[in-house]
Image: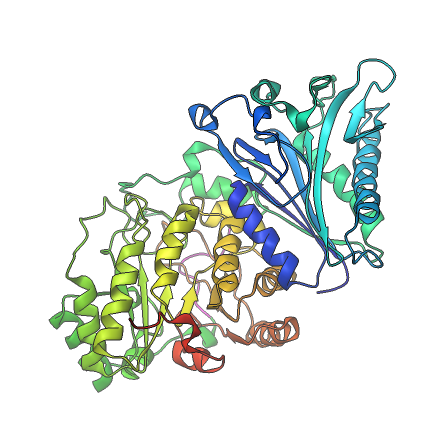
Amino acid sequence: MSGKLQVRWLGRVGYREALDVQRRLWSHSADDYLLLLEHNHVFTAGPSADEANLLVDPGEFGADCVRIDRGGDFTYHGPGQLVGYPILTLPGRRGGGLAETSAYVCDVEQVLIDALADLGLRGCGRLRGYPGVWLDLDGTPRKIAAIGVRLSRGRTMHGFALNVETDLSWFDRIIPCGIRDFRPTSLRAEGSTATLREVADAVVLRATQRWSQAGCERADVAWRHRPSDLSAFSRQLGPSRVEVAPPRSRARLAEAGVEDGLRLAERKPPWLRARMDLNEGYLRLRRVMRQHDLVTVCEEAGCPNIFECWGAGTATFMLNGERCTRACGFCLVDTRQPMPIDPGEPARVADAVAEMDLDHAVVTAVARDDLSDGGAAAFAETIAAIRSRSPGTTVEVLVPDFGGDAASLHTVLEAGPDVLNHNIETIARLQRAVRPSAGYARSLALLARSASAGHVTKSGIIVGMGEDDAEVDVVLADLAAVGASIVTIGQYLRPTSHHIPVARWVSPESFERWRDVGATLGIDHVESSPLTRSSYHAAESAAAVELGARTRPVPA
């Protein structure tokens, strides 16, 4: 992107999601990244790990266990531990042999040793024969950071785990790194009061000095999360009579650095005034939707382009009902208790697609966290039904994140959509304020999984919620790095006074510039304009990239 080290604080991330993002950045991106995060409780092990060093059944303690392609034995990751994954291209180290890998491990160790010294923790160093960072080398050595890396084709994966305020009792359930003679420690156990954020800042400073002459470009998600951030399935909150977002949303925005936005009554600039046009095509499509008892996101989300798109014979069908189990701060879709799944819905969508003689069909769905597969089966059934009725129609799906479940996404991908779309929605800093039940890393992982499976992959960004133009550039870089081929960018329009406020009206010139930025980053098509929405000009966007039969299942 810029020659700078791309630093991302991603918050609490599932291990498998982080691994899939790593793998995609390692194989697809030329940029150097440092991903910083915490994990949920997980034990990991390299291919040569000794099974005897895992002392418990991880499932009994609510932990996962993952085998991975790095050196080292069993180790533990969990809350209060700063995990870092440098994904770097190392000049002159293409072979990935023992000497090259050892030299890189020393680099990682030195970054941590220097960062800990900056935080006032003296006496950290290396213990001969034991990778990692240690304390009290001449007395009773204690390990404060574990390191396990992979170096292949001159590019690195995996990294380090630095214990900040970790619950050290978790290490009693394994023989950490196969070492029986020494015990782990943490900054907190050594008397340091440094916070996870302060430790991350120190590591970023030293990592940038060691690995980037151009400096770093950093984006952080929120540093503080609460259980109350997550939405209940049956959250029933009607529109407010006052022109402010709910207190919970306002607090999250304030923590993200966003002050009060524009008043709901403020007049929109001329480029945002969509014209009502009850044209013949719009009326015909509305009749088809009513005839087949179908829901569209165009209506449910109050899309400003509905007259233009329906007039041209395009619409986005919405599956799994009209009630969503999330409560994103920008979205108008109903968030009451969801209704049971309608098994006839996929066939009715296929009938409508055939009746409309569509060349390109777009299908989305509400989030259904109440279902074991997150609603994935309905996508697969709808794709199959459209293929059966209209074999020549290309199918684009706009999916939720399925709670990060890779198996649910696989269900959709196996059905062979021509385009897999999932919206990242906003910049890292605003994720918690805008969509607290989702996550920046989770969305990147989903997109990485789709692109790695060979599917044309698409994502979307809403602007005007408190970001600046440079932060949108960073999101575009991340989307390009994980393999997105199509990106949409449009202006946020506040649906009601209950939703988060508009922070600014973004100029048409900024949208034009983002098209150029995306092209420079290697994204095949960026649909960017004030009124662009996820499915706006979807057929034209799809036509701009190669849609091949490689994504479709082979008929039996």
Q: Residue at x 29, y 74 (%)?
A: 315
Is 32 positioned to the left or the right of 274 in the image?
Answer: right
Count of labels shown? 0
Q: Quadrant of the C terminus?
A: bottom left
Q: Which residues are magenta?
A: 260-268
Q: Quadrant of residue 377?
A: bottom left
Residue 34's spot in the image, x, y percent? 69, 49
Q: Residue at x 56, y 20 (%)?
A: 173
Is 535 positioned to the left or the right of 110 in the image?
Answer: left
Q: Is residue 104 above or below residue 552?
A: above
Q: Residue at x 31, y 83 (%)?
A: 359
Q: Is residue 79 above or below residue 406?
A: above
Residue 103's spot in the image, x, y percent? 84, 44
Q: Looking at this view, is 294 or 228 the one in front? A: 294
Q: Quadrant of the N terminus?
A: bottom right
Magenta stretch, main secondary structure class: loop
Residue 85's spot in the image, x, y percent? 67, 45
Is 352 positioned to the left or the right of 467 in the image?
Answer: left
Q: Looking at this view, is 321 or 409 the one in front? A: 409
